[in-house]
Amino acid sequence: MTTLFISDLHLDETRPDITRAFFDFLQSHAIKAKALYILGDFFESWIGDDDSSALIESVKKTLSTVSKQGVAVYIMHGNRDFLLGNTFCAEVGAQLITDPTVITLAGEKTLLMHGDSLCTDDQQYMQFRKMLRSPAWQQDALSKPLEERRAIAKHLRMASNEANSNKAEDIMDVNADAVVAALKEYGCTRMIHGHTHRPNRHPITSDNIKAERIVLGDWDSNVWYLTDESGSLSLHSSPL
């Protein structure tokens, strides 16, 4: 059976076309799979598991139909939805996995990551990330009323978009040394991540290591997914 990997859907009420594409993907591909891994930025923002917007409720209902068919669903935090918690995962029948997570895929130890922690050239972002991932910051954020959290999330998105518009493209990509260091630390020969919105397959033959880095695509204009079918890995794309 097939194992599927997706990331960076950035589901949002302003993009119903992406939501429809995701639901179609669940019914045409995921429901027949062995497992579905969602490697971060599933949602454009997440302000807490107590948010019950129409979008979130529709995602809960549709994703649950897949897990109830016996498909294992795994969700990893991204830089947009790092407050997503176990309550949501329990409601959809998914398991929240850490970043990074090691699995065996097609006989190889494979490192799953969202990918933002590899962008070490962007020091401004790395400091911002450290603050947002702090348990103290998250506890304080989640203690605020829902509408206040919504306003904070909107402000953070605007600040992030403005900052990124002034950055060189290369510093927003992964750092090659950080990639090799992560593979060595976890003893893996393959890495799968998203975040950068630069889908591709990269061989790594530097620093006494032979490995592969597979980058998942974002769903802004195309559906992107990786399949492992009987040990054969393929990166797929189709228009929304």
Image (spheres, rainbow, N blue to C red):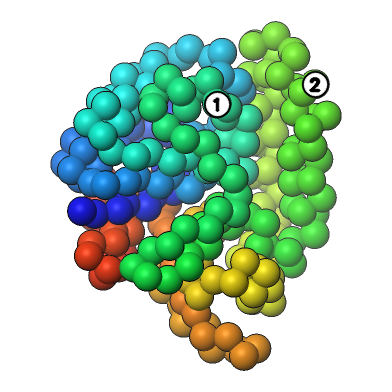
Estimate how packed mark 1 is, as few (under 14), some (14 to 19) or many (20 or more) residues with alpha carbons within 10 Å.
some
Residue 143, disc: none
Q: Are marks 2 and 1 in contact (CB under 8 Å)?
A: no
Closer to the chain start, of discs 2 and 1, is: 1
Above or below — where is 214 with respect to 86?
below
State the residue in front, 187 or 125.
187
Quadrant of residue 21 within the rendered picture: top left
Amino acid at dot 1: Asn
State the residue in front, 5 or 98.
98
Above or below — where is 134 with respect to 211?
above
Element carrying mark 1: helix
State the residue in front, 27 or 231.
231
* Residue hosting label 2: 140
From the image, state whether disc 2 or disc 1 is nearer to you: 1
Element carrying mark 2: helix
User: Which quarter of the rendering shows the C terminus?
Assistant: top left
Image coordinates of residue 131 in percent, x first then y, are 81, 40
Please tell me which residue is depicted at 28% across the width and 38% down the height of the picture: 71
Q: Is residue 199 left or right of residue 153?
A: left
Q: Is residue 187 left or right of residue 152?
A: left
* Residue hosting label 1: 86
Please tell me which residue is depicted at 62% across the width and 36% down the height of the picture: 82
Q: Tell me how many marks there are.
A: 2
Q: Is residue 56 visible?
A: no
Image coordinates of residue 166 in percent, x first then y, are 70, 56
Amino acid at dot 2: Asp
Please tell me which residue is depicted at 66% across the width and 62% down the height of the picture: 118
Estimate how packed mark 2 is, as few (under 14), some (14 to 19) or many (20 or more) residues with alpha carbons within 10 Å.
few
Above or below — where is 126 with respect to 105?
above
